[in-house]
Amino acid sequence: MSLIFVLILTIPCFFISRWGLKKLEIGTTKNRNYIALFPALILSPLIYIGIIFLWIASSSYYPTYEFNKRQWETHPEERYTMSEDLMDNKLLIGKTKSEVSDILGTDFYTHNNNHISYTLGFVPGLFNIDPDVLDIYFKNGKVIRVSQHES
């Protein structure tokens, strides 16, 4: 299947190469077609690989937003868009468990007295089949670390 796409890409690459050779006055009219085959055969797989990388990058992209309590509560499947703001700006560091539950809600999982987590939803990605989780760690009753991982 991918060979067909590469061959399809070769056609416009050939014509563009031939046009460029004509503009640069390289080769004669007779041998310009043969000379244009080489760049076309080299460029078409490179363009194909570039298209694949762009597709992978675009499927993994998602916008990030500042933390918004209302959005957090009403759209739990999209919490991942705000988790980066929570971590980068250290919005929870130094807070108690009750202060965290006032901010993020009470729908957390308790692992032990020093570790709770919130489900963030499915982060867009190529092979992402598990939801991400926001882990909040406490020491002496205060948040010391916030991290995110795929469950």
Image (tube, helix red, strand yellow):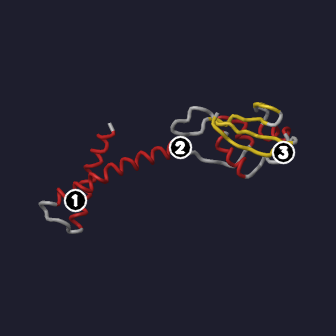
What amino acid does circle 2 point to?
Answer: Ser
Mark drawn on residue 18: 1
Mark drawn on residue 95: 3
Mark drawn on residue 6: none
What amino acid does circle 1 point to?
Answer: Arg
Above or below, 96 against 130 in this view is below
Label 2 – label 1 distance at C-alpha = 37 Å
For disc 1, the neighbor class at 10 Å (few under 14, some 14 to 19, many from 20) is many
- In this view, the residue in front, 77 or 91, is 91
Q: Secondary structure at mark 2?
A: helix
What amino acid does circle 3 point to?
Answer: Lys
Left or right of 117 on screen, residue 33? left
Q: Which residue occupies 45% across, 48% down? A: 54
Dot 2 or dot 1, earlier in sequence: 1
Left or right of 7 on screen, residue 109? right
Spot occupied by residue 81 in the image (x, y as percentages of width and height) = 64, 44
Label 2 – label 3 distance at C-alpha = 32 Å
Spot occupied by residue 45 in the image (x, y as percentages of width and height) = 33, 48
Left or right of 1 on screen, residue 88? right
Spot occupied by residue 106 in the image (x, y as percentages of width and height) = 79, 33
Mark drawn on residue 60: 2
Dot 3 or dot 1, earlier in sequence: 1
Q: Which residue occupies 85% across, 43% down? A: 142
Left or right of 106 on screen, residue 4? left
Q: Secondary structure at mark 3?
A: loop
For disc 3, the neighbor class at 10 Å (few under 14, some 14 to 19, many from 20) is some
* Quadrant in the rendering for residue 7: top left
Q: Which residue occupies 76% across, 40% down? A: 136
